[in-house]
Amino acid sequence: MKEYKYSINGKEFAVTVGERNAEGVTPVTVNGEAYDVALIPEPVVEKKVVVHAPAPKPQTGEKDDLQDALRSPLPGTIVDIPAQVGDEVKEGDTLVVLEAMKMNNNLTAERNGKVKAILVSEGDAVKENTPLVTFE
């Protein structure tokens, strides 16, 4: 048990602080009045990150849609998707903007075609080689 004397705005206080018990409560006496003091813990903030894995291959005899999909060249976060499903795109058109290593990277169409599916959303974290956009 520890004893202290404080002066706050000219008024004196005699404070006695006891040992914290198993429940985390510490007995404190101020000028003869007893208090049970418990520390309020800081809230724990969880950060959730969504990482898309490559989509499974189709089970039918059809051509693999992901075979010539636009893929992420490196890990990063999707910050913009200017393309939409059904858009006719030309080689060099920006389809997805990927932030990686503090830089925005425009990922462009490698050939003319029509956007069949967009496999990611803005804010998604992706790994290298993750399929992003498929074509018809």
Image (cartoon, rainbow, N blue to C red):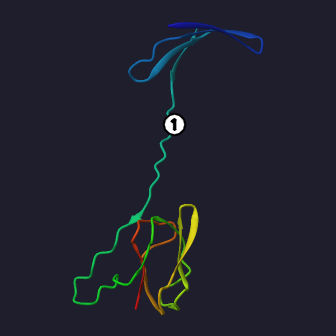
Extreme residue toward the right, this view: 10
Q: Quadrant of residue 67?
A: bottom left
**Residue 107 location, x and y as percent?**
52, 77
- In the rendered view, does 128 fall on the left or right side of 81? left
Mark 1 neighbour class, 10 Å CA radius: few under 14, some 14 to 19, many 20 or more: few
Is 12 drawn above or below residue 82 in the view shown?
above
Which quadrant is the C terminus positioned in?
Answer: bottom left
**Residue 25 location, x and y as percent?**
46, 21
Q: Secondary structure at mark 1?
A: loop
Q: Quadrant of residue 126?
A: bottom left
Please tell me which residue is depicted at 44% across the width and 58% down the height of the picture.
49
- In the rendered view, does 79 fall on the left or right side of 75? right
**Residue 62 location, x and y as percent?**
26, 90
Q: Quadrant of residue 14?
A: top right
Residue linked to disc 1: 42
Please tell me which residue is depicted at 55% across the width and 72% down the height of the picture.
105
Is 95 drawn above or below residue 100 in the view shown?
below
**Residue type beneath disc 1:** Glu
**Residue 4 location, x and y as percent?**
61, 8
